[in-house]
Image (cartoon, helix red, strand yellow):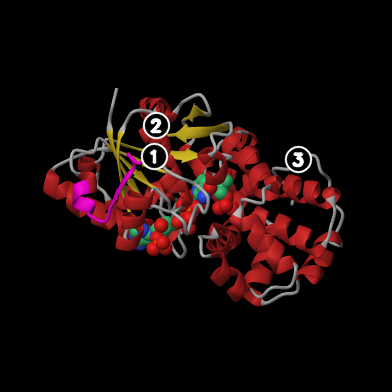
Amino acid sequence: MTKKVAVLGAGSWGSVLASVLLENGHQVELWTNKESQAAEINAEHTNSKYLADFHFSDKLHATTDLHAALTAAQVVLFVVPTKAIREVAVQVCDELRAMNSAPLLIHASKGLELETYKRVSQIIEEEIPAGYRSGIVALSGPSHAEEVAKKDLTLITAASEDLKQAEETQALFMNEYLRIYTNTDLIGVELGAAFKNIIALGAGALHGLGYGDDAKAALMTRGLAEISRLGVAFGADPLTFIGLSGVGDLIVTCTSVHSRNWRAGDQLGSGKKLADVINDMGMVIEGINTCKAAYELSLQKGIEMPITQAIYNVLYQGADIKQEITCLMTREGKAEIGTQQQA
Ligand SMILES: NC(=O)C1=CN([C@@H]2O[C@H](COP(=O)(O)OP(=O)(O)OC[C@H]3O[C@@H](n4cnc5c(N)ncnc54)[C@H](OP(=O)(O)O)[C@@H]3O)[C@@H](O)[C@H]2O)C=CC1
Ligand SMILES: O=C(CO)COP(=O)(O)O
């Protein structure tokens, strides 16, 4: 059934997801806060800052008018960086109240809010009361905009505490190159998505420093152990971390040249200053904020996260990466069995 979908955020992932929905036969309005970007998408059918070589269908319409984007929308898809979710949700709520409308809310953002440590669905839930939404779903998993744009094969997860809402989202997005699985462990899916970006920064750094495949495999494995440990402490199902939104996304983000987190880590490992890495990327590097949030949460919960702590020390305390690696390698010996308990 054709639906009207408002896609909020016209970065790489928002514009490609809008394109998928359009191709699946839905009516789509892509909302951006930049007039020049809307004009480029509508006239040139490109989004050059975010997807240099890609041409969108001339049916993809972008607007800076949030009211127009949300009018009659049955579904609202949030795809702005995590730090902008609250601000955008507040604006959306004002519009939905005025329209007395309650669409299905989906988000595809991967991070935790600084200070509150909230997951993206929690932020949306806080800002948009129950009367103005018919559900909240997280869309997550191993997916880079650059590959989905080319219709490469991609499998992701639609997670909601309400299976029906996850199934509705599955039906919206699924096609011959994009396969969607449902999951009811919203906490596990959102936390896996947020935390894997921290480990990807580390994997990039190892590459930048010239370490080999053994080191990268070790980092991913032990990284998965510690992010699952923190996730489980917040109510996630441990099995979710071996699914698409867990190890699946960890693998792609720790190995793909498309990953902004991996590339940021690679540049840090090669000696570039953090401020320059952020400035030159021009796109969101979610792992930087999420590392701080996860590190602080791990202290609150008394959960050992040695890799996250090492990355935090590099990002926020100016620590030397090689020295942090030496500290990790020379920690007292541990038993691997019982990874849920042992750091
Ligand atoms: N790129 C990918 O392949 C994937 C990304 N994701 C996740 O999706 C989310 C978005 O990522 P991505 O599209 O890559 O990010 P980008 O950095 O490519 O784009 C972010 C977009 O959001 C816009 N934006 C930022 N703040 C606001 C605001 N306050 N109001 C309105 N628009 C705003 C930016 O506008 P401006 O140009 O003005 O800065 C930009 O258009 C992230 O959480 C990411 O982890 C998930 C899976 C895949
Ligand atoms: O989440 C992603 C892939 O699944 C995108 O990762 P990056 O934000 O590191 O590019």
**In the figure, 154 relative to 110: above or below?**
above
Span of residues in magenta: 58-68
Residue closest to the eye, 131 or 264: 264
Indicate the amino acid at tag 1.
Ser
Where is residue 268 shown, x and y percent of the image? 69, 68
Residue on which the image places disc 3: 338
**In the figure, 25 relative to 53: above or below?**
above
Where is residue 246 shown, x and y percent of the image? 61, 40
Q: Distance between the residues labelled 1 and 2?
A: 9 Å
Q: Distance between the residues labelled 3 and 1?
A: 51 Å
Q: How far apart are marks 3 and 2 (CA)?
A: 46 Å
Label pair 1/2, CB-CB below 8 angstroms: yes
- Residue 57 disc label: 1
Residue 81 appears in the picture as rendered: no
Residue on which the image places disc 2: 23
Dot 1 or dot 2: first in sequence order is 2
Label pair 3/2, CB-CB below 8 angstroms: no
| Mark 3 residue crowding within 10 angstroms, few (<14) / some (14–19) / many (20+) | few
Ligand 1: give its quadrant: bottom left
Is 269 positioned to the left or the right of 276 in the image?
right
Residue 13 appears in the picture as rendered: yes
Asked whether residue 63 is drawn in magenta, I would say yes
| Mark 2 residue crowding within 10 angstroms, few (<14) / some (14–19) / many (20+) | some
Helix, strand or loop under label 2:
helix
| Mark 1 residue crowding within 10 angstroms, few (<14) / some (14–19) / many (20+) | some
Toward which corner of the image does residue 202 lie, by quadrant?
A: bottom right
**Residue drawn at (31%, 60%) of the image:** 33
